[in-house]
Amino acid sequence: MLRQRLIAAALGLPMLFALLWLNWWLRVRWHSPDDLPLLLIVLLIAGISGWEVSKVVQQRLRYASAMNGVYAALIIPFMVHAIRLASQGDARVPVSSLGLLIDSVGVTAVVMFLFLAVWSDIEHRGWIGLRENLIVIAAGVYLGGTTSALLLIGETPMHEIAVAVIFATVFAVDTAAYFGGLHFDGPALAPHISPKKTVSGAVCGLCAAVVFLLVVKAVAPALPSVSQAWWNFGGYFASSQAWWQLVWLGISVGILGQIGDLVESSFKRWGQVKDSGHVLPGHGGFLDRFDSLFLAAPVFYLMLVNFLHLP
């Protein structure tokens, strides 16, 4: 299990950070406002997780659509990306860009496919079809809405570096919670939802989030600034009082991340499955790997806006 997790991380993390680097390169070198690599990251996480949600629902509701979770999960990311691009232009005339074209086609397609699929299901199965589709759509909207926070994080003055930090913080929480639970054991955190998650693991995960952000703050000012995209905590949290802000940020991400994990565990228990998928060896599916991110990303963005007094 551990070996598989390490292999998945060794393959997945370079791809993730390569896309973030490409996003920076296109934005800084080519002056492109589209952030298409970042949009791709969000669409992949939301879309694959939406498909896995549909498959879990099918374990309880056999005839639920396998694709409606994907369609529902992609709507909000396309809309958030389009609104962000349009707001960069003149108030009366939106910016003309490849990104807006992709958003327009994308949101039209997924809304049309979702409408046709739901309408067809209602015609064939009536109220039962509507009820099952509402469950899948609600889960998809949750995934798409929360992962869209990554697009907003990318709009902060720290851009891609902020996105990289929230991913790294969430991974630190998950890793510390996993190994902390194995080493210290102790009482279960939520025995009726996830018996293997322990209180000691949760505390280790919370501490890891705080420590990681404090280390980034301490190290960032000493590193060479490669561009305005570099997230220099020393610059944005200039006073010594900024340390407590990082503590609160770490606590919030640590708590919300683990709540997101428990939400996903509760959903899998409802669907009577152990893993949401088998895409990532050692982790299960995308839903298993990114469950902590879904709630951590929005709170991370909101606290950055508050601490940095962003408009």
Image (cartoon, rainbow, N blue to C red):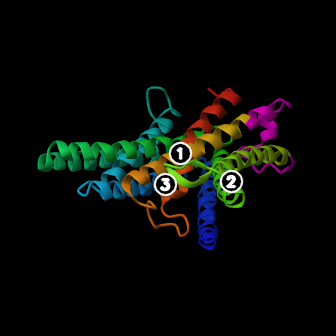
* Whole-number angstrom distance, CA of label 3 to CA of label 1: 15 Å
How far across and down, in percent of the image, does residue 284 sit?
50, 64
Q: Please report whichever mark, 3 or 2, sits nearer to the chain's N-terminal start.
A: 3
Front one among 241 and 76 = 241
Count residues near mark 2 (Cα–Cα under 10 Å), then give few for <14, some for 14-19, many for 20+.
many
The quarter of the picture where the N terminus appears is bottom right
**Element on which disc 2 rests:** helix
* Whole-number angstrom distance, CA of label 1 to CA of label 2: 15 Å
**What mark, if any, has residue 172 been given in the picture?**
2
Q: Mark 1 = which residue?
A: 260
* Image point (21%, 48%), residue name: 116
What's the residue type where badge 1 is placed?
A: Gly
* Image point (72%, 56%), residue name: 184
Q: Nearer the viewer, mark 3 or mark 1?
A: 1
What's the residue type where badge 3 is placed?
A: Ile
- Residue 242 magenta-highlighted: yes
Count residues near mark 3 (Cα–Cα under 10 Å), then give few for <14, some for 14-19, many for 20+.
many
Q: Is residue 193 left or right of residue 136?
A: right
Q: Please report whichever mark, 3 or 1, sits nearer to the chain's N-terminal start.
A: 3
What span is in magenta?
A: 222-247
Q: Can residue 11 be seen in this view?
A: yes
**Element on which disc 1 rests:** helix
Give the image quarter of residue 221: top right
Q: In this view, does 10 lie to the left or right of 246?
A: left
* Image point (81%, 35%), residue name: 243
How far across and down, in percent of the image, does residue 310 sit?
65, 28
Q: Cβ–Cβ below 8 Å for labels 1 and 2?
A: no
Give the image quarter of residue 10: bottom right
Q: Mark 3 = which residue?
A: 45
How far across and down, in percent of the image, does residue 136 sit?
33, 47
Front one among 157 and 16 = 16
**What mark, if any, has residue 298 been given in the picture?**
none
